């Protein structure tokens, strides 16, 4: 079996579009009050609704995507995403904008379940570490691109221009993938989708030491990474602040695609994730001892980079069938959104109560819990 790398890159490109469903609003959030002055605190839901949909329906997405088939679900999700961005470019009233973000949340979920499942199915076993590490970079790359080009586009042409650009991007990938994704490996039987099956699926996933393991670790990763990037800036030297904040996601991606891929060719993905969590905890102790130290920040980003790509590589290593991989990817979407949602408020509350010293300690505990979760689930798998 030979890996079709152009198709893999196209699926990764679809993932960039799904990450931009978050990022396109995040990068222009400070300008939205000018358009919706009456919104007040409600405006926060314009960003968070996509994540809330993921928390509630992450596992459901795994079932639905497997039911409608991965190619069809992915292409329809891209078209829906394109349509919602085109609609948002009209700058509708706030209730309609919020409704469109709920629909966009469903589109986002379908993409982040279908695309990595297809990547795992299409990749030769020897290339899966590389291709799934590439997939693991989609959020960081999308946010970097939007920061570099999205804000200048809005400054020159207004918010609608950014939404239209995103709509065109999603439509282009929908067309390309509808043409290119013709021959696919067998996808297994179609699952039944009803309330009883949905509840049963949640129990099956989170009781399984194989299906639920990637999501267990992913929760603690997202809890740490997003919250640290959010609350760390005031504790960095002002003259280095922007450079460090820009460098941390880039360092994380570089380490994931170099050292992470090299390790994945030599040891199981779960062990790479465990190594990343352990190293991250040590780096957070360093940050506790040397508040705001630039090298400690970059070392932490590098350690978390090992967790980033390798977590997606654990999915096909622990789950043989397309349907169980879709379930696992759906659980990762659910736990990732939960970690993103809880991480910043919890760390911010710790900062208010205990000052800077509390932040690296709580984050280090989260990393150790991620390590322990994988170690415990690994022992259960070995015993089974």
Image: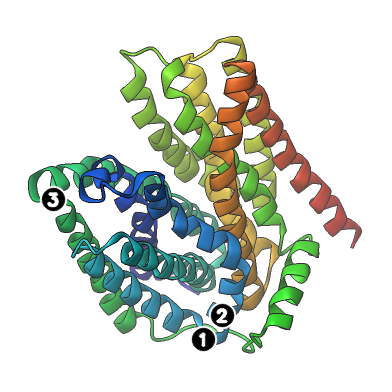
Of the numbered discs in the image, which one, if any, rests on residue 175?
Answer: none
Q: Name the mark on residue 158.
A: 3
| Vertical arrangement, residue 370 with respect to residue 157, above or below | above
Tell me whether the residue at label 3 lies in contact with that at label 2, contact meaning CB atoms closer than 8 angstroms.
no
Q: Check the image and report above or below for 107 versus 44.
A: below
Which residue in the protein does label 1 denote? Answer: 68
Kindly give the residue lying farthest to the front in the view shown. Answer: 38
Q: Nearer the viewer, residue 276 or 35?
A: 35
Residue 259 on image: x %, y %:
51, 39
**Residue 132 seen in the current view:** yes
Q: Residue 357: which quarter of the image?
A: top right
Q: Say if 25 sits above or below 300 in the image.
A: below
Give the mark nearest the N terminus, 3 or 1: 1
Find the distance from the CA under tag 2 to the CA under tag 1.
6 Å
Which residue shows up at 62% across the image and 68% down it? 59
What's the residue at 20%, 68% (across, down)? Answer: 168
Callout 2 touching callout 1 (CB < 8 Å): yes
Q: Let me know if residue 283 appears in the view.
A: no
Question: Which residue bears the numbered disc 2?
Answer: 64
Residue visible at 63% across and 62% down in the picture: 331
Image quarter (top left, top right, bottom left or bottom right) of the C terminus? bottom right
Q: Nearer the viewer, mark 3 or mark 1?
A: 3
Q: Secondary structure at mark 2?
A: helix
Which element type, helix, strand or loop, lies under badge 3? loop
């Amino acid at each position: 079996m030979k890996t079709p790398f152009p198709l893999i890159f196209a699926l990764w490109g679809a993932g960039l579009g799904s990450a931009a469903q978050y990022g396109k609003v995040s990068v222009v959030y400070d300008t939205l009050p000018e358009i919706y002055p009456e919104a007040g605190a409600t405006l926060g839901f314009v960003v968070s609704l996509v994540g809330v949909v993921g928390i509630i329906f992450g596992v459901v997405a795994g079932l639905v995507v497997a039911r409608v088939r991965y190619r069809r679900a992915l292409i329809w999700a891209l078209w829906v995403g394109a349509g919602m961005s085109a609609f948002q470019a009209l700058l509708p009233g706030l209730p309609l904008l919020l409704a469109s973000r709920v629909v966009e949340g469903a589109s986002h979920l379908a993409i982040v379940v279908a695309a990595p499942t297809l990547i795992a199915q299409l990749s030769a076993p020897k290339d899966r570490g590389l291709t799934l590490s590439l997939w693991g970079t989609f959020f960081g790359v999308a946010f970097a691109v939007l920061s570099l080009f999205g804000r200048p586009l809005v400054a020159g042409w207004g918010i609608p221009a950014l939404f239209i650009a995103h709509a065109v991007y999603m439509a282009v990938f929908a067309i390309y993938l509808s043409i290119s994704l013709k021959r696919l490996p067998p996808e297994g039987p179609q699952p039944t989708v009803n309330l009883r099956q949905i509840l049963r699926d949640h129990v099956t996933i989170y009781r399984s030491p194989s299906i639920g393991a990637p999501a267990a670790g992913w929760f603690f990763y997202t809890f740490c990474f997003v919250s640290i990037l959010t609350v760390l800036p005031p504790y960095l030297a002002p003259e280095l602040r922007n450079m460090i904040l820009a460098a941390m996601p880039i360092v994380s991606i570089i380490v994931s695609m170099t050292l992470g891929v090299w390790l994945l060719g030599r040891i199981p993905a779960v062990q790479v994730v465990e190594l990343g969590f352990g190293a991250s905890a040590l780096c957070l102790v360093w940050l506790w001892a040397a508040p705001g130290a630039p090298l400690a920040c970059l070392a932490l980003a590098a350690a978390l980079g090992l967790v980033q790509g390798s977590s997606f590589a654990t999915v096909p290593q622990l789950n043989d069938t397309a349907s169980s991989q879709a379930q696992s990817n759906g659980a990762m979407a659910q736990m990732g959104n939960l970690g993103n949602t809880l991480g910043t408020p919890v760390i911010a509350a710790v900062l208010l109560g205990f000052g800077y010293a509390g932040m690296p300690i709580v984050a280090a505990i989260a990393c150790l819990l991620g390590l322990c979760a994988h170690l415990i689930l690994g022992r259960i798998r070995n015993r089974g």
